[in-house]
Image (cartoon, grey):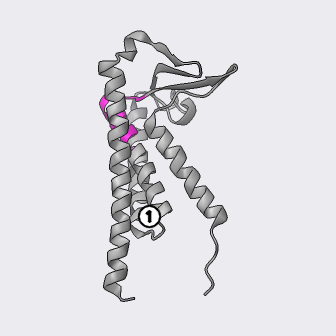
Amino acid sequence: MNIVSTRSTKTKKWLFGMLMLVVVLVCDQFSKYWILNIFNLPEKHSVETLPFLNFTMVWNKAITFGMLGDALGQYAPIIFAVVAFSIAVGLFVWMIRASKLCVILSLGAIIGGAIGNIIDRVRFGAVVDFIHLHVSGWSWYVFNIADSAIVCGVGVLLIDAFFRKESKR
């Protein structure tokens, strides 16, 4: 195989990562627009949609699971956005260099989710969370589509890392 065909194949895979990034970002931002402006969840606070699913309005001013929310004061949204952007840039470089499609798609999902939450922090000073799953008294933290994409992407990367067969050299 020559260099041109290898480069072409890698570019095509990289485009799948970009497509995943855009799909996650658009779905995340559209869902947040719908929740805030059409469904008007901030006024309703919480609405049961299914026996195990509520739409519950949470403005997350912290990072994962509400950590460090008060520690950084008014500058928290800016600091979190800058850190998330820096990580997203690093993941983007990884995505461009990766050759395995599942890794490229996972990185695209993670970057798209990160950018979605960065947009919220810049626009609102907090991330818009609204999906609340609960079953038999068990309740998960309220999250959004960006968070789901990040968790699923990281999960696929971990599975890939644990089950990757080392190539013989």
- Residue 80 x %, y %: 43, 39
User: Which of the image's four quarters has the N terminus?
Assistant: bottom left
| Residue 122: x %, y % from top left | 32, 35
Q: Residues within 10 Å of mark 1 (few under 14, many from 20)?
A: some
Q: Nearer the viewer, residue 154 or 126?
A: 154
For this view, does 168 lie left or right of residue 32? right
Q: Is residue 120 magenta?
A: yes
Q: Which residues are magenta?
A: 115-128
167 or 96, which is in the foreground? 167
Q: Residue at x 54, y 44 (%)?
A: 151
- Can residue 70 be found in the magenta stretch? no
Q: Name the image quarter holding residue 141.
A: top right
Counting labels gives 1
Where does residue 142 sit, x and y in percent of width and height? 53, 27
Q: Please say whether residue 82 is visible from this viewpoint.
A: no
In the image, residue 145 sits, relative to residue 59, either above or below, namely below
The amino acid type, in three-letter code, at marker 1 is: Trp
Q: Is residue 70 left or right of residue 113?
A: right
Quarter of the image for the C terminus: give it.
Answer: bottom right
- Tell me what residue is drawn at x 34 percent, y 68 percent: 12
Q: Identify which residue, 64 or 5, lies in the foreground.
A: 5
How far across and down, in percent of the image, does residue 137 sit? Answer: 69, 19
Helix, strand or loop under label 1: helix
Q: Looking at the image, which residue sits at the far top?
A: 43
Check the image and report above or below for 115 versus 49: below
